[in-house]
Image (cartoon, coloured by chain):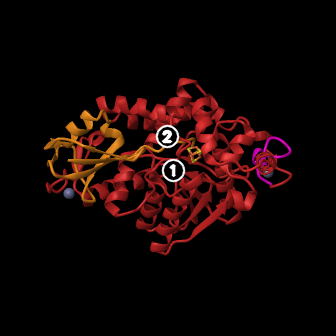
Amino acid sequence: MRVLLRNPRRELDIAGPRRVHALLADLELNRESHLVIRNGTLVPSDEELAADDVVEIRPVISGGAV
Amino acid sequence: MKCRVCREPAVIDVPRHNANFCAPHFLDMCRRQVRKAIDDFDMLEADDRILIAVSGGKDSLAIWDMLIDLGYQADGLYIGLGIGSYSDVSGEYARAFATERGLHLIEVSLRDDYGYDVPTATAATRRVPCSACGMSKRHLFDKAAIDGDYTVLVTGHNLDDEAAVLYGNTLRWELEYLARQLPTLPAGNGFPKKVKPLVRLSERETAAWCIIRGIDYLVDECPIAAGNRHLGFKAALNTIEAESPGTKTAFYLNFVEKVAPLLAAHAFANDVTLHPCTRCGAPTTGEICAFCHLVETASAHEPVPVELITGKGARRR
Ligand code: SF4
Ligand SMILES: [Zn+2]
Ligand SMILES: [Zn+2]
């Protein structure tokens, strides 16, 4: 599957199928700080992503002094 | 995964509530949390004139959307910080959100209105960028709220923001900062009332609200933020949260409920000496306030591009 990552923007090809939580674990990304989006829709952590899916892993952490 | 409420397929799991939700029931959960924060901490009245500090990011657009959705009247205030293309794009998101919904967005530009921008202020003051930036924002938000006769200033600080600041202040036992880290600060001493209605929602949840509601926000981060201490605290807390869901919520909300009242005597210890700045009228301990000092120093400095700051800033931190 094609995976779009942000900050910095980059794309990866990952072998599928793969569950969302396993994909995040493979990439060493914390589930608390990321959402996974497929076709504009959120996908929950136990969802199976297909080999031909295109997904975005969106970081949700904002920085800066507040 | 099925929605806890309706058993339809879920779109998100929320480990800290040990629950999964479909899109409509997730939005309901968010509304309930914001409603509860507003009620528990006496944040807003139905007839308040609300000003929201809007950055173009997920939190400020989510809270603007939620407050309108809950029936409040609220205008936005956007401050152009002059942080290269990041600021240009964030302004576009804020403007588009307001225009599409027929909402009123007030705009202030550091460069056009005060003769400096954040990269230049950083170079001129030789401090970390977030210091001049944060001070400018706080001053201008307060000023706009007072000048515009708004009864309350709303900011988009979420649970993760507050837990990270609390963590930092606790590690150093900064009693005065701790005592003032409340979700509602009353008006007084020349400052407007300030409230944080998102304190019961995590960043993951405010981002999910935007995605479900179709709100376009700026996902890219401030190029200056990368690697700062605040982000390190968030990452540390999220490592704990992943092992033990609900920790951030308990850490912050139990602090507000159980510890902050014990520290109340420390909260406004220094405010008694405040008087109006001779230049701008803002409350200050000196003759001229820190913002007016900054304007003087930074506007006299040759403009500095953001690229220079991001390179230097990374080393200095
Ligand atoms: S992260 Fe960027 S926008 Fe936020 S306070 Fe720091 S310099 Fe300002
Ligand atoms: Zn449901
Ligand atoms: Zn002043």
The answer to which of B143 and B265 lies nearer the viewer is B143
CA gap between label 2 and label 1 equals 9 Å
Q: Please, is residue A51 above or below residue A26 in the view?
A: below
Residue B89 visible to the viewer: yes
Q: Which residues are magenta?
A: B281-291
Q: Position of residue B43 (x, y in %)?
A: 52, 54
What is the letter of the orange chain? A
Check disc 1 and report the residue beneath it: B196
The image quadrant of residue B24 is: bottom left
Q: Are marks 2 and 1 in contact (CB under 8 Å)?
A: yes
Q: Position of residue B10 (x, y in %)?
A: 19, 52
What is the letter of the red chain? B
Check disc 2 and report the residue beneath it: B162
Amino acid type of disc 1? Answer: Lys
Q: Position of residue B8 (x, y in %)?
A: 14, 57
Specify the principal SS of the magenta part: loop
Give the chain of mark 1. B
